[in-house]
Image (tube, helix red, strand yellow):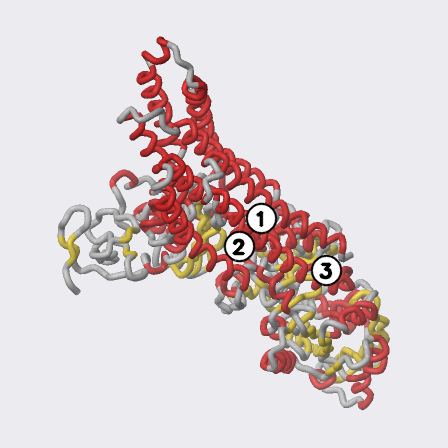
């Protein structure tokens, strides 16, 4: 490798490991000098892991030594298990898309970091790393060395307090002071008052106006210059470039007038422009805060959990009702919603929900278990350490590991328009300036500045997020919870709907259950109910609820085989509960029944027969869907209920029985190969593969804590009949986005036409620009609310 010279000190950087981000962006720390991420065509920079691991600038050396204290680190970490730890750090200096890109590529800068994800609105980065390879303090020093020093306060982490950034308020106040005083001092110029005293001291007042403009130009407008500089530095043109250029051009032109005594300049317009731009930004922030949808979506996130009361009774409660010290019961395949201490003797926890690695970890009594783990095997009990964080659970659900790679039409359209918007705007501004400069100099500068200010793609960029965010909120209030906004776009494309039968179109709460077979002893009933207690399969839950209350016994072995049944051991007795083939039944009538079979110590006892009750509104729902969608019903059960189902469903609905989980998945694949956009509606357990394969996977929730990352949405069972309404609303959301795209473009076209022809002053343009954004955002919110009410 060739020796390179250090950009700062000129010394050779040797024995360094090259880390290439793209053609122009590199990071160098080879000689223990801290470099920023920068774009220099002729400079190649390096990061030396061997020579200077965790090298830090002198001003922060030792600042984060407290991160070597394990007790402090444990308070900061969201998750820590063996070779995986996760931490969320507040990064106040995140400003643009370049910052996001750098922070999401930390694994290229530091060995041991496996993944990082930025939450831009909250200015946070969530880092997954191997604590055996890199410490938290090294990660913090690395962030500091590349210009993104995190803000760490244990008080804030524990209480949730946030520092309020008032810099915009201060800048707005300075701009208003400058604007108001300059306006007052400019009155004689406005009215062309000829008076000896005013004429004599006119140069003094002009220079005083110049001095008053400097704080607004240098301080109040500084954010636009910084943003424009970073944009140019990272080779990405953003909308702040024309705004900064317009402000600078107006200042230079006005200063020239003052210096050469051509006139009083446009300092009143300049400071007014800065003031109204900042005022518009303030209004935008307030508007976005008022129309904040993400918080509402998370607060409605539905997971129930079984709490064990002091009298040993069990009840299903929402996770946000869980308090520190509560005792929880976690069944097979259930998600652990909170951090806690394991009470049971032993547990096997799958943390793939958090880490993406599906390797179960064995825990013993007294060990700490983390939120996001999934219990595998027999039922266990735990004590709660902290109350639940809804936002953390939602964050897990949206983990990049489980995202489906699908095209985002409107995001792509917005990105394309935004990419070419600024170059096109600059071209129009310079061409118009070139035209007007030969006609009227003052008009030329006004036209140039007005064009740069009035056109803004902000409204265009916010159209889709605000529409989707409001629809997420509306759906959440009606107990239909989507993983993210992209699911709405996918729902609008659906043309084929596949329903699972058991636990999806049938209800778990109203089934009539009868028993056929040898008489079960009281001991057998106790054992059967205890085994069923650990399962979340719909039939298991129905049967468990129907059996009389008994005292639980200890299970020594438990295994639930998807699509087949449960195998467990109690006091040396092997108990099989499940399908006829799994339990070893040779009953010929099983082909016409939905049943759960019982075998104890290889002796077949009998079966519980389920006469399923279908969900309310099922017939009406299928009739409303029939005209617009292909409908298919899959079931792992036999064809015993085919006649009753055919009577409920529209003519021509395809019914397919005796489907194993892998066969359901293959069926979805076949439909997709035919060009269909498939929505799968299942119970989230046996249907996990099909839900993951489908374009949209919806899991029906019946107040149990079975939650699969495979699903894209959760629908509470009592809202099942509204499924068609949700589909129609998603289509209207896409229509709203199209209309608001058109409105935003119309704003820009009209504004530019007035600016190009010289009929729009820069000051008016500064008022119109944020007003257009607020108008479009309000429009999409009102229209989505209107459609939500109209379609009911």
Q: At x 83% / y 82%, what residue is drawn?
A: 518
Using the image as rendered, state which of residue 287 and residue 738 is in the foreground. Answer: 738
**Figure disc tally:** 3
Dots 1, 2 in contact, CB < 8 A: yes
Please report the residue visible at 60 percent of the width from the left and 59 percent of the height from the top.
483
Q: CA distance from mark 1 to mark 2?
A: 9 Å
Q: Earlier in the sequence, mark 3 or mark 2?
A: 2
Find residue 500 and report its horizontal and vertical position in percent.
71, 74
Q: Quadrant of residue 256?
A: top left
Instruction: Measure how far apart labels 3 and 1 are at the Cα level.
Output: 28 Å
In which quadrant is the C terminus drawn?
A: bottom right
Task: Kindly indicate the quadrant of the structure image that contains residue 442.
Answer: top left
Q: Which residue is mark 2?
A: 368
In the picture of the structure, the residue carrying the numbered disc 1 is 385
102 lies above or below 521: above
Distance from the alpha carbon under mark 3 to that under mark 2? 31 Å
Q: Nearer the viewer, residue 336 or 29?
A: 29
Q: Confirm or deny contact between disc 3 and disc 2 (CB under 8 A).
A: no
Q: Nearer the viewer, mark 3 or mark 2?
A: 3
| Labelled pair 3, 1 in contact (Cβ < 8 Å) | no
Name the residue that disc number 3 marks. 716
């Amino acid at each position: 490798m060739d020796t390179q010279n250090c950009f700062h000190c000129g010394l050779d950087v040797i024995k360094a490991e090259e880390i290439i981000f793209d053609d122009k962006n590199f990071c160098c720390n080879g000689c223990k000098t801290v470099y920023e991420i920068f774009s220099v065509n002729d400079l190649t920079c390096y990061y030396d892991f061997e020579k200077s691991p965790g090298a830090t600038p002198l001003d922060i050396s030792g600042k984060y030594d407290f991160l070597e204290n394990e007790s402090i680190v444990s308070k900061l970490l969201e998750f820590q298990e063996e070779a995986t730890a996760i931490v969320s750090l507040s990064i106040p200096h995140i400003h643009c898309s370049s910052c996001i890109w750098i922070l999401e590529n930390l694994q290229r800068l530091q060995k041991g970091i496996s993944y990082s994800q930025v939450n831009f609105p909250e200015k946070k980065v969530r880092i997954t790393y191997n604590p055996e390879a890199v410490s938290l303090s090294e990660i913090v020093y690395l962030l500091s060395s590349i210009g993104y020093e995190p803000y760490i306060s244990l008080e804030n982490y524990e209480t949730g307090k946030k520092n309020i950034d008032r810099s915009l308020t201060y800048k707005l106040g300075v701009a208003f002071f400058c604007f108001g005083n300059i306006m007052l001092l400019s009155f004689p110029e406005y009215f062309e008052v000829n008076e000896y005293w005013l004429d004599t001291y006119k140069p003094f007042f002009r220079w005083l106006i110049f001095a008053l403009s400097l704080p607004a130009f240098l301080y109040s407008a500084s954010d636009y210059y910084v943003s424009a500089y970073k944009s140019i530095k990272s080779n990405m043109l953003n909308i702040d470039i024309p705004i900064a250029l317009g402000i600078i051009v107006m200042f230079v032109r006005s200063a020239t007038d003052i210096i050469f005594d051509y006139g009083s300049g446009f300092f009143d317009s300049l400071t007014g422009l800065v003031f109204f731009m900042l005022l518009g930004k303030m209004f935008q922030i307030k508007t976005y805060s008022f129309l904040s949808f993400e918080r509402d979506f998370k607060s409605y996130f539905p997971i129930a959990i079984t709490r064990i009361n002091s009298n040993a009774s069990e009840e299903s409660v929402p996770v946000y009702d869980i308090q520190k010290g509560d005792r929880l019961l976690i069944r097979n395949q259930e998600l652990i919603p909170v951090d806690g201490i394991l009470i049971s003797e032993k547990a096997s926890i799958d943390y793939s929900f958090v880490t993406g690695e599906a390797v179960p970890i064995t825990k013993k009594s007294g060990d700490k278990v983390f939120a996001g783990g999934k219990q595998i095997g027999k039922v266990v009990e735990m004590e709660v350490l902290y109350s639940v964080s809804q936002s953390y659970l939602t964050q897990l659900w949206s983990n990049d590991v489980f995202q489906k790679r699908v095209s985002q039409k409107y995001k792509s359209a917005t990105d394309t328009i935004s990419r070419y918007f600024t170059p096109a705007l600059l071209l129009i501004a310079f061409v118009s300036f070139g035209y007007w400069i030969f006609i009227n100099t003052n008009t030329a500068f006004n036209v140039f500045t007005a064009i740069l200010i009035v056109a803004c793609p902000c409204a265009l960029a916010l159209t889709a997020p605000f529409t989707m965010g409001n629809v997420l909120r509306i759906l959440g209030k009606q107990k239909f919870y989507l993983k993210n906004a992209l699911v709405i776009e996918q729902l609008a494309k659906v043309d084929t709907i596949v329903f699972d039968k058991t636990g999806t179109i049938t209800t778990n709460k109203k089934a009539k259950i009868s028993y056929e077979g040898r008489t079960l002893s009281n001991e057998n009933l106790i054992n059967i109910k205890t085994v069923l207690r650990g399962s979340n399969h719909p039939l298991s839950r129905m049967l468990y609820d129907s059996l009389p209350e008994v005292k639980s016994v200890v299970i020594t072995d438990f295994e639930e085989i998807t699509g087949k049944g449960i195998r467990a051991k109690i006091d040396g007795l092997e108990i099989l509960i499940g399908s006829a083939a799994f339990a070893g039944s040779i009953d010929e009538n099983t082909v016409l029944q939905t049943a759960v079979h019982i075998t104890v110590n290889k002796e077949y006892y009998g079966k519980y027969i389920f006469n399923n009750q279908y969900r309310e509104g099922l017939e009406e729902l299928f009739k409303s869907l029939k005209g617009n969608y292909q409908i298919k019903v899959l079931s792992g059960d036999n064809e015993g209920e085919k006649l009753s189902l055919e009577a409920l469903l529209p003519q021509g609905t395809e019914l397919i029985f005796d489907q194993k989980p892998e066969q359901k998945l293959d069926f979805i694949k076949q439909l997709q190969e035919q060009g269909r956009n498939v929505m799968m509606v299942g119970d989230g357990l046996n249907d996990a593969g099909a839900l993951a394969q489908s374009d949209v996977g919806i899991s029906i929730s019946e107040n149990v804590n079975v939650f699969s990352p495979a699903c894209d949405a959760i629908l509470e069972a009592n809202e099942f009949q509204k499924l068609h309404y949700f589909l129609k609303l998603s289509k209207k959301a896409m229509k709203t986005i199209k209309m608001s795209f058109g409105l935003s473009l119309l704003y820009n076209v009209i504004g530019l036409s007035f600016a190009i022809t010289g009929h729009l002053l820069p000051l008016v343009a500064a008022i119109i620009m944020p007003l257009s954004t607020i108008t479009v955002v309000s429009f999409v919110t009102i229209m989505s609310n209107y459609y939500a009410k109209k379609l009911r």
